[in-house]
Image (cartoon, rainbow, N blue to C red):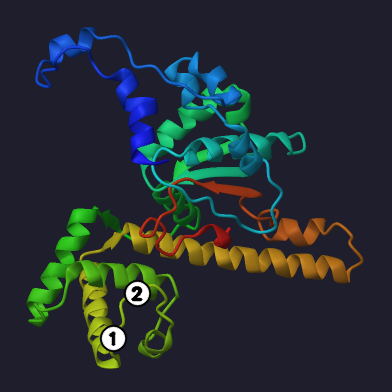
Amino acid sequence: MDPDDVRWHITDKWRADEEVNTGDWARAAKRAVFQAETDDDAVLDALGRSFDAWRLFLHPEQHRIATADVKGSAKVTGGPGTGKTVVALHRVCHLVDRLPPGHSRPVLLTTYNTNLALDLKERLRQLGGDELLRRVDVESVDALAHEVVSESRLDLGLPLDDDAAMALWHTVLTETDLLACDADFLDAEFRHVILAHGCGSWDSYRRVTRSGRPRISTAQRHEVWQLVQAYRAHLDATRRTTYALIADRAAGLEQRRMARVEEQARYKEEQGGRDLVHREAGSGMWLKPRYRHIVVDEAHGGAWPGLTPPHF
């Protein structure tokens, strides 16, 4: 709308009759609560509800996204406050409703932060109760990665927190006298290029496509690679690790698990689709994907080093 129309329809309607002292908080608190106008029936219905209800309110357009049938993965984007998390919660509910009866947890709802995961769990409880939660795993990606690695009985060492991991980059830069390099850049390059693309050698890193990353020369890449090796050598020497490395190892374990699942499926098809009780029991577990559905809240860059949903 034209700014003058906005003023006429909204600003002027709620302008105070008297002069307002913007520093008088006590008087402001006594003023009537603001009013809102809308022709949207769904919003009008929700306006009379509690704040908790608003945290779960689903607009018809959001409902369309939450219940859509998609092949493969789908990404929902939007600015803060546009309801992405609400859509994610209702998506989980929709996926659980379509599950066959059972007692497993084939749906994962995950995010990058433990506190956010706890909030998601509580909001999911408000939406569908304990019955819904019984079919869903709600945990942070770091907790999930640690769980995957622990199942394999691997001891990667105690993880450094984010500040300590960044401080180690500064230590490596000081020791190599390459102070012109940027620790933040190195950390992002390590996470989003070297780990994300599985660069296990200088040759693979030299050739990898660095989509979305700043352009650097081959000589600069070689310098980065040497710094990364020094960084990892420090971790090995102190029997420490990082959350990014745990996530990377977890992703590798799940990739190998899925390779076994696919090999088992091919073998079963070759045998005419018969159940393979002895073959599957001999593996120590019924080989199957860890989850049937995954919903990720706040999957922004930087949150998923190495451990991304397709690995499951």
Q: CA distance from mark 1 to mark 2?
A: 12 Å
First in sequence: mark 1 or mark 2?
2
- What residue is rendered at 53% in x and 27% in y? 57
Residue type at tag 2: Arg
**Residue 302 in the image: above or below residue 176:** above
Residue nearest the viewer, comparing 219 with 176: 219
Locate residue 279: give its quadrant. Answer: bottom right
User: Can you give x and y, in whole percent of width and height, for residue 158 in the image?
Assistant: 28, 55
Dot 2 lies on which element?
loop
Front position in the image: 40 or 97: 40
Q: SS for tag 1?
A: helix
Q: Can you see residue 92?
A: no
Above or below for 238 versus 47: below
Asked whether the viewer can see residue 71, the reply is yes
The location of residue 290, given as percent across then percent down, is 61, 52
Lateral position of residue 188 relative to residue 163, left or right: right
Identify the residue at horizontal 76%, vertical 34% (top origin).
101
Q: Position of residue 149 (x, y in %)?
A: 45, 56
Label total for image: 2
Q: Which residue is mark 1?
A: 221
Choose between 229 and 85: the one closer to the eye. Answer: 85
Quadrant for residue 312, please give it: bottom right
Q: Amino acid at mark 1?
A: Arg
Q: Are marks 1 and 2 in contact (CB under 8 Å)?
A: no
Q: Which residue is mark 2?
A: 213
- The quadrant of the rendering that contains the N terminus is top left
At horizontal 47% and vertical 45% (from top left) the residue drawn is 297
On the image, the x and y values in percent for residue 152 come to 49, 58
In the drawing, what numbered circle is on residue 311? none
Above or below residue 88? Residue 167 is below
